[in-house]
Amino acid sequence: MNGPHLIYFADPMCSWCYGFSPVLDQIRRAYGDALPVRVVMGGLRPGTDTPMTAEAKASVAGHWVHVHEASGLPFDPAVLDREGFIYDTDPAARAVVVVRRAGEDVAARYLAAAQRAFYAENRDVTSGAVLADLAEEFGLERAAFLEAWGSEEAKQETWRDYAMSQNAGVTGFPTLVGGPNAEGVYGVVTRGYAPGEQVLGVLRNWIASIAA
C-alpha cells in the first residue's frame, strides 16, 4: 500500500480480536479509502492437533466472559462442546488469506464474519465447509474457494503472514499499527483490545501529526 495506512494483526479465533471487530468497523466508517487497512494473520494457535480438555475449554470460556464484559458482544460457548474439538486457528486464518485476494476490505469483513460465526453462532470455523459457506456469503464461488483454501500456495501464504507478524515484534492480538510517517516509520496504534473512542483519538492525533 502507498501512503498512510493501517496494518491489523489479528486471528479469526482470537476472542479479543472478535471484541475489537466493532472498533475496526468504526475506523473503516470514519476513514474509508483514505486510510486503508491491511489484514495480516497473526497465527494464534496454528497447527494445533490435540483435542481440547475440559479444563482448557473452561479456561477459554472464562476469557470470553471478560471479552463480553469489555465489548458487549455475544458469545455462545456451546461451540466448544463438540466432541474432540481441536482449537486449530490455521484453517480460518487461511480462509481469510484466500478471501484477501479479492481485496483488503472484503478480507476485513470476512474476518469479522468468521469471528461472529465462531463466537456467537456456534459454527465450527475449523471446518472447510463452514468457511466455504461464509465465502459464498461474500460472493465467492464455493468450489474455487475450497480449491484455493486447500492449496499448498495458500498454506505458504498464510505462514508468511505469521512470519511477518513475528518479524514485526507482535506478541499479542489484536495489534494495530499505522504508517508510514515522513521517515518511513510505523507506530503502534493499539497493542491489545481498546475501546473505539480511544483508538479513534490516537488515529486523529497521528493523522494530524503527519499532515502538519
Image (cartoon, rainbow, N blue to C red):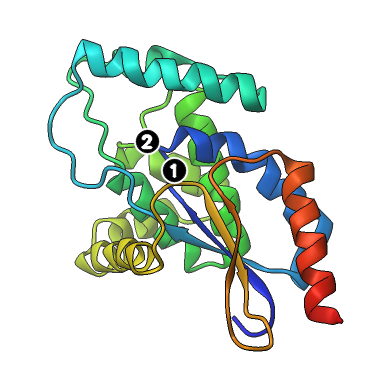
Residue 125 is tagged as 2
Q: Is residue 60 placed above or below 115 in the rendered structure?
A: above
Q: Position of residue 186 (x, y in %)?
A: 58, 74
Residue type at mark 2: give it: Val
Image coordinates for residue 34, horizontal then vertical, percent = 78, 72
Question: What residue do we see at 29% from left, 16% from top?
Answer: 57
Amino acid beneath label 1: Pro
Q: Is residue 205 above or below residue 200?
A: below
Q: Residue at x 76, y 67 (%)?
A: 206
Vertical placement of residue 199 versus 209, above or below: above
Give the crowd class for mark 2: few <14, some 14-19, many >=20 residues within 10 Å. Answer: many
In the rendered structure, the answer to whether residue 192 lies left or right of residue 181 reads: left
Closer to the observer: label 1 or label 2?
1
Q: Give residue 112's position: percent from left, percent from top.
A: 56, 43
Q: In the image, 136: left or right of 150? A: right
Q: Nearer the viewer, residue 32 or 195?
A: 195
Label 1: state its secondary structure: loop
**Numbered circle sitting on residue 59:** none
Q: Is residue 59 left or right of residue 196?
A: left
Q: Position of residue 195 (x, y in %)?
A: 70, 38
Residue at image coords 24%, 56%: 150
Give the Cα distance between marks 1 and 2: 9 Å
Q: Are the residues at dot 1 and dot 2 in contact (C-beta closer than 8 Å)?
A: yes
The answer to which quarter of the image holds residue 130 is top left
Q: Would residue 132 be found to the left or right of residue 70 on screen? A: left
Residue at the far left: name it.
50
For label 1, the residue is 12
Among the two numbered marks 1 and 2 on one chain, the one whose residue lies closer to the N terminus: 1
- The residue depicted at 41 percent of the width and 51 percent of the height is 142
Label 2 SS: loop
Asked if one can make out residue 55 in the rendered structure from this viewpoint, the answer is yes
Crowdedness near tag 1: few (<14), some (14–19) or many (≥20) residues, C-alpha within 10 Å? many
